[in-house]
Image: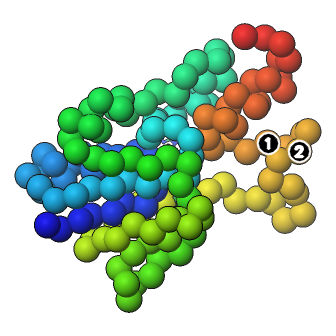
């Protein structure tokens, strides 16, 4: 049976995984993401995500992935792709074999030359954790 591995558990990766099922793909689907959360929408992070400490707006809950037979690996950055062996190697040493590979690794903010990625005065806003950190810095102690 064919196995598709999707690297990048953002909106693109998650929607691609569900779209495969909607198009009757019956093989294995593994969605691999570096972040600790299931895939979530990023736009709210710069809107309501800064106004209130809420959980991320998930694209689907764990049950929906299970029902769609989509294996989701979170906290699992891919460190290397072995194209000869058709496998991705995770930073923790695990290896996941694929027949087809989809890279949905998104984008990262550019850092100004000389500026640190995160410091007391300069902060990135890309992930749910970033939004929580900014919120905490703006209003320490506020829930
Ligand atoms: C704060 C904020 C506000 C936004 N607001 C809007 C808006 O109002 N309107 C709008 O249209 N767009 C908005 N966007 C942009 C929109 O969120 C992005 O276009 C969208 O998230 C892109 O989805 P993606 O899945 O392609 O990439 P991403 O969301 O970047 O997801 C890629 C995922 O791949 C993971 N990844 C990367 N490398 C690896 C690896 N080696 N191994 C495992 N996983 C990996 C990353 O950790 C990430 O989780 C906003 C973005 C941000 C950050």
Give the numbered dot on residue 119: 2
Image side of residue 9 versus residue 76, left or right: left
Check mark 1 vs ligand 1: CB closer than 8 Å? yes or no.
no
Does 74 sit above or below residue 79? above
Give the numbered dot on residue 123: 1
Question: Helix, strand, or loop for circle 2?
Answer: loop
Between 104 and 65, the one lying in front of the other is: 65
The location of residue 52, given as percent across then percent down, is 64, 15
Q: Tell me the quarter of the picture where residue 68 sits.
A: top left
Does 29 sit above or below residue 139? below
Q: Is residue 48 visible?
A: no
Q: Are marks 1 and 2 in contact (CB under 8 Å)?
A: yes
The location of residue 84, given as percent across then percent down, is 38, 89
The location of residue 78, given as percent across then percent down, is 53, 65
The location of residue 136, given as percent across then percent down, is 79, 23
How far apart in space, not on screen, are marks 1 and 2 (Cα)? 6 Å
Image side of residue 86 versus residue 20, left or right: right
């Amino acid at each position: 049976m064919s196995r598709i591995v999707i690297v990048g558990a953002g909106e693109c990766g998650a929607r691609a995984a569900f779209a495969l099922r909607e198009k009757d793909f019956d093989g294995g689907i593994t969605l691999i993401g570096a972040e600790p959360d299931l895939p979530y929408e990023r736009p709210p992070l710069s809107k309501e995500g800064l106004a209130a400490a809420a959980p991320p707006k998930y694209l689907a809950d764990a049950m929906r992935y299970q029902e769609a037979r989509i294996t989701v690996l979170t906290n699992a950055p891919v460190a290397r792709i072995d194209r000869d062996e058709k496998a991705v190697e995770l930073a923790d040493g695990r290896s996941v074999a694929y027949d087809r590979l989809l890279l949905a690794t998104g984008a990262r903010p550019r850092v100004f030359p000389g500026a640190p990625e995160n410091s007391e005065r300069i902060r990135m806003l890309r992930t749910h954790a970033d939004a929580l950190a900014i919120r905490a810095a703006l209003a320490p102690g506020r829930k």
